Amino acid sequence: MEILFYICAAVSVLAALNVVLQRTPVYSALSLILVLCLLAVIYLLLGAEFIAVIQVIVYAGAIMVLFVFVIMLLNAGREVPSERSRLARWLGVPLVIAFLLEVLWAVWNQFPSGTAPAADFDAGPAAIGHLLFRNYVLPFEVTSVLILVAILGAVVLAKKEE
């Protein structure tokens, strides 16, 4: 089980890098679907079956259909490489390395004894619904409004002038 976890984690990181490095938006969206499905497998390995199913249905299904729809609506083609600035060329790699070192330092300090944290909450639908609609209702509603604004913006951008 642990080996499968590490395989899924490594492939997920590689697919996430492909999302960023891909020049074609449709291929980038397909890589993101792979990342979301691999995260669902990781949730299954961690014993959170409900979250894994919701991950596949909501994110890999509905949200990615929305992304692909917006990509097709905007008729986004292959990205044309642009001339990079000297500042980005000289500072890009050291800043990425510094960022990765800081993330590793934060993770290392989060789990100093080398043990994973124990799950102290129920991951069932009732507990998730209670948390979502009691404690996190504002972020939930803000996210839904942002998705609605993104859809409307894509429609306005793609509308042909007559």
Image (cartoon, rainbow, N blue to C red):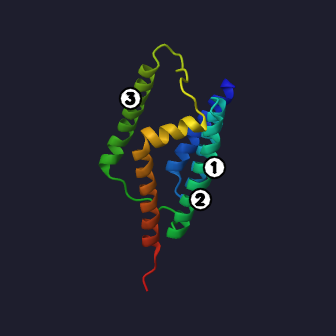
Asked if marks 2 and 1 touch (Cβ < 8 Å), the reply is no
Residue at the bottom extreme of this rendering: 162
Marker disc for residue 28: none
Tell how many labels: 3
Regarding residue 108, the answer to whether it shows in the image is yes
Q: Name the residue nearer the viewer: 43 or 16.
A: 43
Marker disc for residue 57: 1
Q: Secondary structure at mark 1?
A: helix
Mark 2 → mark 1, Cα distance in angstroms: 11 Å
- Residue indicated by mark 2: 65
Marker disc for residue 102: 3
| Local crowd size for mark 3, using a 10 Å CA cut-off: few (<14), some (14–19), many (≥20) | few
Give the label, 1 or 3, closer to the camera. Answer: 1
Residue at the left extreme of this rendering: 87
Residue 103 screen position, x and y as percent: 42, 30
Residue 69 screen position, x and y as percent: 56, 64
Q: Name the residue nearer the viewer: 151 or 97.
A: 151
Q: Secondary structure at mark 2?
A: helix
Q: Tell me which numbered mark, 1 or 3, is placed earlier along the sequence.
A: 1
Give the label, 3 or 2, closer to the camera. Answer: 2
Residue 38 screen position, x and y as percent: 63, 40
Tell me the amino acid under the disc marked 2.
Val
Tell me the amino acid under the disc marked 3.
Glu
| Left or right for 47, reference 20 | right
